[in-house]
Amino acid sequence: MRLTWFLDVAEFRKAIGLILVLALGAFLLLPLATLLIWAFADVWRYPSLLPQQYSLRWWNWVFTNGDVGKAVFYSFTTAPVVTLISAIVCLPAAYAFSRLKFPGRQVFFIGLLATNAFPKFGLYISIATLFFELNLINTFWGVVLIQLINTLVVMIWIPAAGFDAVARELEEAARDAGAGPLRVFWRITLPLAMPGIIVAGILAFLAALDEAQGTLIVGSPRIITMPVLMYSLVSNYPEPVGAIFSVLLSLPSLVLLLFARRFLLAGYLAAGFRGR
């Protein structure tokens, strides 16, 4: 009798777990499914659960619209530049936080979160005031610098965790074998820390690609990226246009996250945001 009771409890827990997983899946996937349906809908009126008419004419409108082409161009030119500059600036800092001991190290490391501790819109307004004095408003480099803010945390914290994961014994063994500090770094430390750096680079690229508020303040009306253009499309055009543009904007994120999946599952993201 007791064994049967335990089996019933175990089956009940499995059923509850399955229900919760399905509920979470529905919560996450139903909005995406609705978005995909809207992207191919021509007429969809309440209370119908599915569109009355389907069409590709709004896809043609999106791909032939000059503003969309410019937004795609600016998005995929600013984001790689931001990622490259972020790597050049932040990776040495990540290595220093991982390997060096200096006064205020932990304070500075935690202080990097200050960019995310306050409403960013006010921060962007303050930076835009400075950019106006430096003639960076409505310029490519002004947009690059404002997008750079969103990449600092991931581009330092996650690579720092990657450098932490490299065993000091391997570096010491290489030095004992006669390798110099630079050779040890390039042949031992950097390759082993590279998965964490790759994750950070992908997340930095996506952060720059998806940034809208700062780009709107600093870049408009000359530099319009895809997330900024979304504001206009959603408010001024039919629903299928916004849905199509959302799908196009989501594709790079989906592809890059699938590419980074094995690194993310390895725990580099969690390690990067673990307290030090």
Image (cartoon, helix red, strand yellow):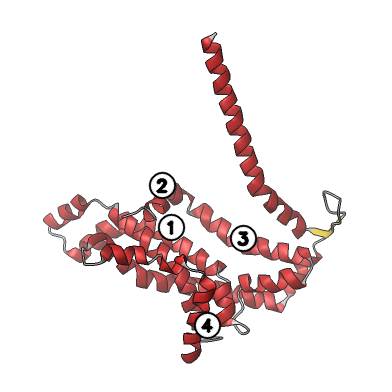
Question: Upstream in the sequence, badge 4 or badge 1?
Answer: 4
Measuring from the top left, give residue 126's x and y in whole percent: 49, 81
Quadrant including the C terminus: bottom left
Q: Give the distance between the C-alpha atoms of the residues marked 4 and 3, in whole angstroms.
A: 23 Å
Q: Which residue is mark 3?
A: 250
Q: Which residue is mark 4?
A: 140
What's the residue type where badge 2 is placed? Ala
Q: Which residue is mark 2?
A: 266
At numbered mark 2, what does the secondary structure look like: helix, strand or loop?
A: loop
Question: Upstream in the sequence, badge 1 or badge 3?
Answer: 1
What's the residue type where badge 4 is placed? Phe
Q: Is residue 140 above or below residue 162?
A: below
Q: Nearer the viewer, residue 105 or 263?
A: 105
Q: Residue at 84% x, 54% y: name it.
A: 51
The crowding category of the residue bearing disc 1, from other C-alpha atoms within 10 Å (few below 14, some 14 to 19, many at least 20), is: many
Question: Upstream in the sequence, badge 2 or badge 4?
Answer: 4
At numbered mark 3, what does the secondary structure look like: helix, strand or loop?
A: helix
Can the viewer see residue 63 in this picture?
A: no
Question: Upstream in the sequence, badge 3 or badge 2?
Answer: 3
Quadrant including the N terminus: top right
What's the residue type where badge 1 is placed? Val
Q: Residue at 26% x, 59% y: name it.
A: 187
Q: Residue 12: name its quadrant.
A: top right
Q: Residue at 41% x, 64% y: name it.
A: 113
Q: Which residue is mark 1?
A: 199
Q: Give the distance between the C-alpha atoms of the residues marked 2 and 4, in whole angstroms.
A: 36 Å
Q: Residue 189: name its quadrant.
A: bottom left
